[in-house]
Image (tube, helix red, strand yellow):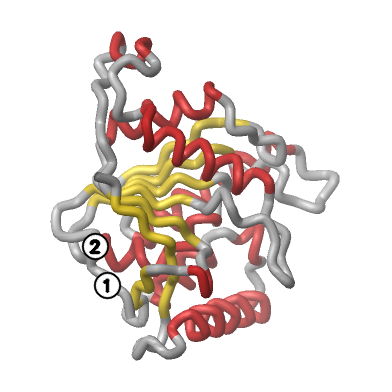
Amino acid sequence: MASEDKANDNKRVMLIVAHPDDGEFMAAGTLAKWAKEGQEITYVLCTSGDKGTSDPELPPEKLAVIREREQRGAAKVVGAKEVVFLGYKDGVLENTLELRRDIVRQIRLHRPDVVVCQDPTRHISHFYLNHPDHRAAAGAALDAVFPSARDYHVFPELISEGLMPHKVHEVYLGGAGDEGTVWIDITDTIETKIRALTEHKSQVGEDSESLTKLGERVKEGAQRTGEGRAVDYAEAFRYIKLR
């Protein structure tokens, strides 16, 4: 099993994702583990998930309020310090210079050592089509990490805001599955991951049957990820060490 303790004591971790619940499905076990170890966790959400419903009677602006509240609840369960919503529209997110600048602003403000984000290279699998917002958020996050957050003359307006350059040292790309290079043992936080996901009631339901099935599905997936690695439950990432 690859080393799972790269985010050591007293590091700041920033999660950057497209939608509410993306972080919980992808990495809540890991984030909760790190929070328990004393890491400072900040969430950055590119959108508020305002299109995430099949109900034509639920307007996007109302859904955004609901999903922001759910995300704050989930982040609290995980142990995150702060949740930031950038306010971009769900379903039409693009990797623009504006989005990159807004992410750079958060990186320079919070100065994370570690960024956890989605994987812009994941398009399809045999059972899955990756949401284009996921790829856009991931691409913008990586472009913000390198080189934009690091370089003084990129986005000079941020310098005028007092936000000086910052170098991120480690990146974890979530949802790696069998392509992972690092597997995190989340056996002690699998129940925390499930509790965090149940905060997203607009997405996972709130009746007992739905929540039971959710917990079973999460455990089955984490168990598969941990197979052959001497752990009961795991989350997998592609790990990048920036020099």
Q: Quadrant of residue 180?
A: bottom left
Which residue was labeled with disc 2? 6
Dot label at residue 3:
1
Q: Do the residues labelled 1 and 2 touch (CB within 8 Å)?
A: yes
Q: Quadrant of residue 235?
A: bottom left
At label 2, the amino acid type is: Lys
Nearer to me, 133 or 55: 133
In this rendering, would 194 be left or right of 121?
left
Looking at the rendered structure, the secondary structure element under dot 2 is loop
In this rendering, would 81 be left or right of 221?
left
Measured as percent of width and height from the top left, residue 218 is found at 54, 77
In this rendering, would 128 be left or right of 24?
right
Q: Which residue lies furthest to the right in this view?
A: 56
Q: Which residue lies furthest to the left in this view?
A: 9
Measured as percent of width and height from the top left, residue 57 is found at 83, 44
Dot label at residue 194:
none
Q: Which residue lies furthest to the front in this view?
A: 243
At label 1, the amino acid type is: Ser
Identify which residue is drawn at 39% across, 16% down: 155
Identify which residue is drawn at 29% across, 52% down: 241
Neighbourhood count class around disc 1 (C-alpha, 10 Å): few under 14, some 14–19, many 20 upward: few
Quadrant containing the C terminus is top left
Measured as percent of width and height from the top left, residue 137 is found at 55, 41
